Amino acid sequence: MLVKIKNALLGGARLSVSEENAPELLSLCLEMKLPVSKTALDEDRLTVETSYGAARKLSRRLSALNIPFTEKCFGLPFFLFSYRKRPGIFIGLALALGIIFLSGSVVWDIRVSGNSDIDTATVKRELAAAGFGLGSSVKTDVDRVANSLLARSDKISWLSINMSGTVAYVQIREEAHFAQKDNSPCNLVALRDGTIERIESSCGTVCVEVGQSVKKGEILVSGVRGGKLGNYSLVQASGEVFAVVSRVFEVEVPFKYEAQVPLSSENGQKYIKFFSKNIFFSKNSRKNTSKCVTIYMEENLSPPFLPPLPFGVVTELVTKYETVTKTRTPKEASDMAFAQLYRQMQDELSDSDLMSKTIRCEMGEDSVRLYCTAVCSQNIAIPQKINQ
């Protein structure tokens, strides 16, 4: 049994001769003390099974004695050799062995929770910039990574990384959410100039009246609350103070502008992304990429009912372009200017009630300018911490 297993792993051979030459074959096996694992007589032919090395010696002796024979090799080496023209099988085998080797020592998946304004992809990019991502060692100092990311990011106020096997669970708290829970004493001050329209204060001392004009930075609701005995206490002023404000918007659209015109598109190289490493099969032959736009399309392997695996194929789509100067007509420039103005007003006055607006258009030699004065009702109270 052990000899059969050895021949299957290291390679073996079956030599077959006619029945009349069977005695010579058996005599040679006994004379050379070959490790024969099996003999069989079938259809007037004798077959012996032995190791590949022993079969080589035996075939030379049979050839020297002019005894005709047939030889058939078997075993793992010959099986692999038969697939030599299919390199994909060996690449897949190498990847499988690599995955098995790395499976318990590197991070396979990162799961982020607690984020609402920051998307998960952004959190993963910031983690990668801090030295932690797919393919990182499970023994990485995650506390150091968390501190490094907090020092770099102005959107995350708290972060925790917990390892469970090869999965990293990242819990974050965004800066805006953290500020809502901050109970530090503060005043409410004016965001911009305006005339007070109404006051909805829930905590603090109101310092202005309806109809009063205020300047930017002026205290509207104070967080300093006085007592009957001359002492005072500090609180977190809260509430809303609405005022009639005047906002000025200016938009300019030139007639001449530079545009990128695509010339041609072609598929670039393909490579495998294994965890955070890129495995290239050929070098990039493009010499000038200054006027090219490259789009990277990544396809990760996602088995059914399982999370995406940390490797896939990346394909480059390269588009060459040239920069040309184009000219807009006055109507096109005017339409674009109005579109930009309305978009800007919508973004900046989304929380305001527009009361009136005045738009002035100037058509110059090189561009179109729009000037807009908008009068609206807006909450101008913003918190400002009190330095104790």
Image (tube, rainbow, N blue to C red):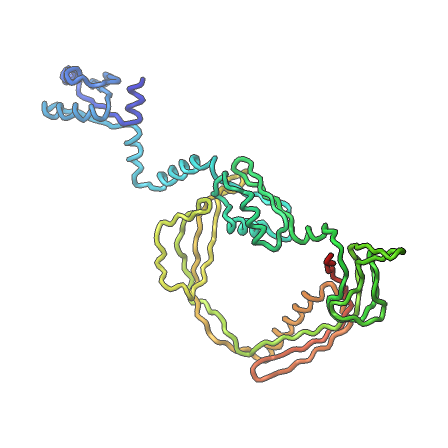
Locate residue 173, reporting x and y percent. 64, 48
Locate residue 267, reporting x and y percent. 41, 57
Foreground of the two, 230 or 246: 230
Q: Residue at x 61, y 55 (%)?
A: 154
Question: Furthest residue to the right?
Answer: 228
Locate residue 142, reporting x and y percent. 54, 42
Question: Furthest residue to the left?
Answer: 65
Q: Is residue 11 above or below residue 120?
A: above
Is 175 positioned to the left or the right of 31 in the image? right
Is 30 positioned to the left or the right of 78 in the image? left
* Image quadrant where one finds the N terminus: top left
Q: Is residue 386 above or below residue 132?
A: below
Q: Is residue 322 above or below residue 135?
A: below
Is 274 positioned to the left or the right of 196 in the image? left
Foreground of the two, 71 or 125: 125
Picture quarter containing residue 58?
A: top left
Q: Can you see residue 332?
A: no
Picture quarter containing residue 155?
A: bottom right
Foreground of the two, 50 or 72: 50
Question: Furthest residue to the bottom?
Answer: 365
Q: Can you see residue 287?
A: yes
* Image quadrant where one finds the C terminus: bottom right
Locate residue 317, reporting x and y percent. 44, 57
Is 246 positioned to the left or the right of 55 in the image? right
Q: Residue at x 73, y 63 (%)?
A: 351
